[in-house]
């Protein structure tokens, strides 16, 4: 009874991931090198997948580490990837790598976030940019997307708020579509509810926006100094820990010489 339940729930999970990736049964069977008949039996619970088959199908569906463990559990197997806290001794080398990247990016801002965009670590260039943000938004488990768009956060100081909002919502929407997560879904709805700051300029016409090379973050400091930034995302490509696989480093670079000089001056004044 228990085994049948495991297999049935695995089949339903597998099918949901296949639909999410817009694969037909034939598409997945062909890509994975298995018969469509066998795949159909696995999805309906008439066939029991091996541990290797679960991982093989997960590979071809691009299932993230956390959900890969869920597939294994549903099929009756132990998770293959551990999930240790960020402060776990085993992850000390990874923490050192993150710290080195953050420090090495100074005087430009960079921060590490988890899968829910919770701030995990920052370099010293971030704090000056957060001056004036409501303390409640900076309390432990601070969310960087909430800080960026909230009226009491950086929302009123982002000069291209509508463009940045569209960029942020698109990123979170893509995350939710790729990996269903109730916390991310709630965050997405919250971000959508924030009102535009008074005087927010109209969105950049699509043709002009996509004629550029990246969506800029145009941020005004408390001293009314404009900063124009572009961002990059760095992840651990070979992570074998669930939490580490979901950690991302967001690094901001100056988009012009004036911004570079302003950030250098801020770093010297600290």
Image (tube, helix red, strand yellow):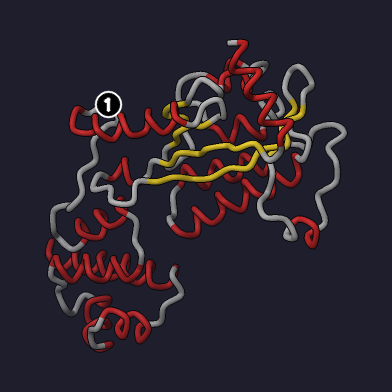
Q: In which quarter of the image is residue 211?
A: bottom right
30 shown above or below 220: below
In the image, is 21 to the left or to the right of 264?
A: left
Q: What residue is shown at x 46% (from left), y 40% (from top)?
A: 116
Query: Is 147 displayed left or right of 204 in the figure?
Result: left
- Mark 1, residue position: 87
Q: What element carries label 1?
A: loop
Task: State which quarter of the image contains the C terminus.
Answer: top right
Quadrant of residue 213 within the rendered picture: bottom right
For the residue pair 270 and 163, the one nearer the viewer reads as: 270
Residue shown at the point (19%, 56%) measured from the top left: 73
- Say if 234 sits above or below 42 in the image: above
Residue 156, visible in the rendered structure: no
Marker count (numbered): 1
Query: Looking at this view, is 131 or 82 the one in front?
Result: 131
Foreground of the two, 187 or 118: 118
Q: Position of residue 187 (x, y in %)?
A: 55, 41
- The residue most toward the top is 270
Query: Looking at the image, is 202 positioned above or below residue 205?
Result: above
Q: Nearer the viewer, residue 214 or 61?
A: 214
Residue at 79% over, 21% down:
224
Residue 43 in the figure: left or right of residue 17: left
Q: In this view, does 98 lie to the left or right of 35?
A: right
Q: Position of residue 163 (x, y in %)?
A: 74, 47
Residue 213 in view in this figure: yes
The residue located at (14%, 74%) in the rendering is: 48
């Amino acid at each position: 009874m228990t085994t049948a339940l495991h297999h049935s729930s695995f089949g339903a999970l597998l099918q949901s991931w296949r639909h999410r990736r817009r694969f037909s049964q034939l598409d997945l069977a062909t890509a994975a090198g298995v018969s469509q008949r066998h795949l159909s039996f696995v999805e309906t619970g008439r066939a029991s997948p091996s541990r290797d088959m679960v991982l093989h199908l997960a590979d071809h569906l691009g299932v993230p580490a956390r959900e890969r463990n869920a597939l294994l559990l549903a099929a009756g197997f132990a998770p293959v990837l551990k999930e240790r806290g960020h402060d776990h001794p085993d992850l000390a080398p990874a923490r050192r790598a993150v710290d080195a990247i953050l420090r090495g990016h100074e005087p430009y801002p960079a921060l590490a976030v988890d899968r829910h965009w919770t701030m995990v670590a920052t370099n010293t260039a971030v704090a000056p940019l957060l001056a004036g943000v409501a303390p409640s938004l900076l309390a432990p488990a601070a969310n960087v997307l909430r800080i960026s768009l909230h009226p009491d956060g950086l929302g009123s100081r982002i000069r291209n708020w509508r463009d940045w909002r569209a960029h942020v919502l698109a990123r979170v929407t893509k995350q939710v579509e790729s990996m269903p997560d109730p916390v991310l879904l709630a965050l997405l709805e919250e971000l959508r509810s924030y009102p535009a700051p008074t005087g927010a300029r109209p969105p950049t016409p699509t043709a002009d926006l996509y004629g550029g090379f990246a969506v800029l973050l145009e941020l005004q400091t408390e001293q009314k100094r404009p900063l124009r930034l572009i961002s990059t995302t760095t992840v651990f490509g070979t992570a074998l820990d669930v939490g580490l696989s979901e950690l991302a480093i967001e690094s901001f670079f100056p988009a012009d010489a004036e911004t570079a000089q302003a950030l250098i001056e801020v770093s010297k004044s600290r």
